[in-house]
Amino acid sequence: MSATRRIGAAGHEHGPDAPLHATAEALVRAERAARVLLVEGISDVVALETLAEVDGIDLTRTVILPAGGAHAVGPFLRRFGPQGTGTLAGGLCDAAEAPFLRKGLRLAGWSGTPDDILGRAGFFVCDIDLEDELLRAVGLDAALEIIAREGEADALHTLQAQAAWRDAPLAAQLRRFLSSRAGRKTRYAALFVRAIPWDAHPRPLRAVLDVGRRAG
């Protein structure tokens, strides 16, 4: 296995080429799937797959497709939306990327107002991003315990000592920590989802899985 094909959480690759490989591999499976859920990145895939496993949701006929960012969703919306296969059941996006997704949905054949087009298409928005949703659900103290168990407390403390982050809120420090190393967001997505109480999982994640289940 090459250095760029390292396998991390839930069997997902991490490394500089991981997003491209993940999209390409999911795209092949999506062509044969009964339904497709569209997300931005690999960590979203891992979070949803882990939550489905925890909840006993069968994803056998569903493919969660990472687009590689909201700016890249257009071709996938057209390919799997009402102008294509019609198998796109919905998806997940970050709050900052919602305007790009709304525009893409309109161009790909969905109807609706700016206020309701996302919901009509089965898409749900994380208040900030996936990491923020997971950190609020698991709790900051629990997140710190998980990071310590993973042997990365010193790495977090190093970041917290940096001038740019020294006075930042803990939640912001943790979000930066998760994004500061390749594969870290993916790894902790699975760990956090498993640590969140059953009735406290983020609403956008549960809603996306419910949409995918109803579509099947």
Image (tube, grey):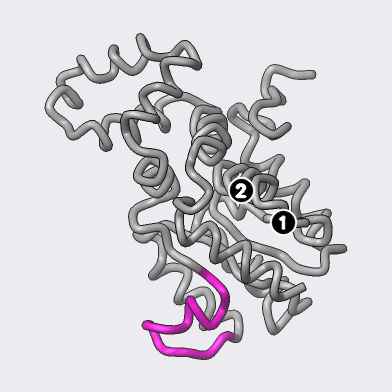
Tell me: 122 left or right of 65.
Answer: left
- Nearer-the-camera pick, 183 or 73: 183
202 falls in the magenta region:
no
x then y, percent, for residue 139:
35, 38
Image side of residue 96 versus residue 29, left or right? left
Estimate the x, y position of residue 19 in percent, counting from the top left.
62, 41
| Residue 130 x/y as whole percent | 44, 48
Query: For the magenta stretch, what is the residue range?
Result: 110-123
Amino acid on which the number 1 mark rests in the picture = Ile
Secondary structure under badge 1? Answer: loop
Check the image and report above or below for 41 versus 104: above
Residue at screen point 38% across, 40% down: 135
Image position, residue 20 (x, y; %): 66, 42
- Disc 2 element: helix
Chain-order first, disc 1 or disc 2? 2
Looking at the image, how many numbered discs can be counted on the residues? 2
- Is residue 157 placed above or below 133 in the rendered structure? above
Badge 1: how crowded within 10 Å, few (<14), some, or many (20+)?
some
For the C terminus, the quadrant is: bottom right
- Point out which mark residue 46 bears: none
- Amino acid under disc 2: Leu
Residue visible at 43% across and 64% down? 125
Question: Which residue is under mark 2?
Answer: 51
Magenta run includes residue 115 = yes
Task: Report the residue at 69% width, 43% height from top.
Answer: 22
Tag 1 and tag 2, C-beta contact below 8 Å: yes
Outermost left residue: 167
- In the rendered image of this protein, does residue 115 appear above or below residue 167? below
The residue wearing badge 1 is 57
Which quadrant is home to the N terminus? top right
